[in-house]
Image: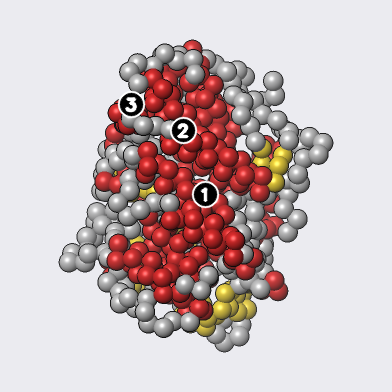
Amino acid sequence: MKKYKYIVTSLIMAGVVCSSACKKQLDVKNPNSPTLEQAKTESGLTSLASGSVYTNGFVNGDGWLGDSFFSLCYGYHELLADDVSAQASNQNVNLVNMPDYAILDDGSKITNPQPQIANLRLNNSRDKQGTNMFYYEWQSMYGLNNACNQILAVADNVSLGGDAATKLATYKAWAYWWKGLAYARLGSVYYAGLINDGISITNGNYVTSAALIAESNKNLNQAITLLNGISSTAGYTEVMSKLIPSFFQVGNAAVPTPTMFVHSINTLMARNLLVNTRTSAMTAANWQTILTLTNAGIQAGDNVFAGFTAANNYVFSAGGGSVSANTAGDKTASSFTISERLVQDIKPGDLRKSKNFVLESPFYNQVGGFTFSTRWRLIDAKLTPVKDNPAFTIADKTPGNQEVYMAGSYEENELMKAEALINTGQIDAGLASVDAVRTYQGAGLAKVSGTGLTLAAAQEELRKERRLSLLFRGTAFYDARRWGVIYDISKGGGRKNCVVLTSTGVLNTNATINYNFLDYWDVPADEFQLNPPAAGSAPIKNPN
């Protein structure tokens, strides 16, 4: 058997985590040891289905910036959306989001000597794995997929007590859900990938990103079929209460009912369509599909797939397991800093701004250039609680207080619905959904529905709301891509009227930025060099 780097994640069996030395080992000699024998009892299957999903998918990062998938992989997405910048050089985070150039208010031009696409490809080699942005999400999501393949391989052969049929359906729905999420994230960011239902093996049949999204939807629909077939929820709740870590089961991260579970699946399928289609290319039929899915998607009172930090949280810590944790607090010490362009998109009077962002003396960073300089700091509620403000708190390093969304949320579902309504001529109905999200997060803003906004003005309300209310939830880069912002100005991309603080201390308010970023990532060298494409495979390198 060939040795593939992502196979290292198959060493997490029955919830047993291998040592830190084992996690660092890349050339695995026996990826099938330990065996699945441990999972052939109900308790063993439960341990496998819980421990392997969370650890393989979201913990084993081979040296994260922070300590989880949600700190580095989500961090890359926020960097590419110009929500944050980075001063640290870990994992190349201070350079992956450098635009091609910026034209300042006085007409002068600052040019990046190493364009982003060239930088990414220079680092896409096995000997530069630590600085290869392409590597990390691929490794985690194929580790997650492999974990789910293990669950599905043994579930039918395990003797289950009580309502065995319901329990079996629950285990399988759990596995198909996480497989669906893995393929959703892979297909939403990579130009090509692999479809694999085997255990600790792979194949050279690379397929397009669209095929990965189709595979995601296939698995998600299989989960829906199983969940819709559950008539008695006692066995379901018993299993799910053991699969979701107890320290996650707080607030709206508690165990979802089967109906709520289906709602999360519908929201993810709506995301699959929305974020992988340029907004300008969306058809009336596309928008109707979004409406159908979001109307059956996450509701305001639903429990969702999220988690809270805790003292014993092995998935993500309060101090380093999320983008918010790595951004909040002292700008000179944090991994990320808040972008001027993010804050400029917050509407005046929004209580979420005064609750979460503070204007301070400028912070200049000479390593990455102008985009790193900022006057804004994200408030850590643990150190600086903002009293008498009912708005949503973005960052709180107090153990137990930080919520991290692993998939969809009510706000995302409602804003996808809003976007579909606005773009099908139902502007006020769409704006009512925008208002609902702002009310939900305590923004304190006057309603925009019923105010006679034009289509363009309504779309701008939607754009600004997604930027803020979905901050650090893993969708920001998708939005920047589908709106066209990341593309070269010659192709309709870039952004005008930007706030830019230069490293020399000049505050510009009408700058133009040409990002010219890679829209879908190449297959990482750690995969294709060990697993070359077979005849007939889809191209593994984005031609852009």
Closer to us: mark 2 or mark 1? 2
Q: Are marks 2 and 1 in contact (CB under 8 Å)?
A: no
Q: Residue 349 in the image: state x and y as whole percent.
A: 30, 77
Q: Is residue 91 above or below residue 151?
A: below
- Amino acid type at circle 2 is Leu
How many neighbours does mark 1 have within 10 angstroms: few (below 14), some (14-19), or many (20 or more)? many
- Per the model, the C-alpha gap separating discs 2 and 3 is 13 Å
Q: Are marks 2 and 3 in contact (CB under 8 Å)?
A: no
Label 3 SS: helix
Identify the residue at image location x=45%, y=15%. 158
The first of marks 2 and 3 along the sequence is 2
The first of marks 2 and 1 along the sequence is 2
Label 1 SS: helix
- Per the model, the C-alpha gap separating discs 1 and 3 is 26 Å
Residue 107's image quarter? bottom right
Q: Is residue 39 above or below residue 183?
A: above
Look at mark 3 in the image and give the residue it sits on.
Answer: 235
Q: Is residue 382 visible?
A: yes
Look at mark 2 in the image and give the residue it sits on.
Answer: 226
Label 2 SS: helix
Left or right of 53, for residue 539: right
Q: Which mark is residue 269?
A: 1
Work out which quarter of the rendered image holds the N terminus and state it.
top right
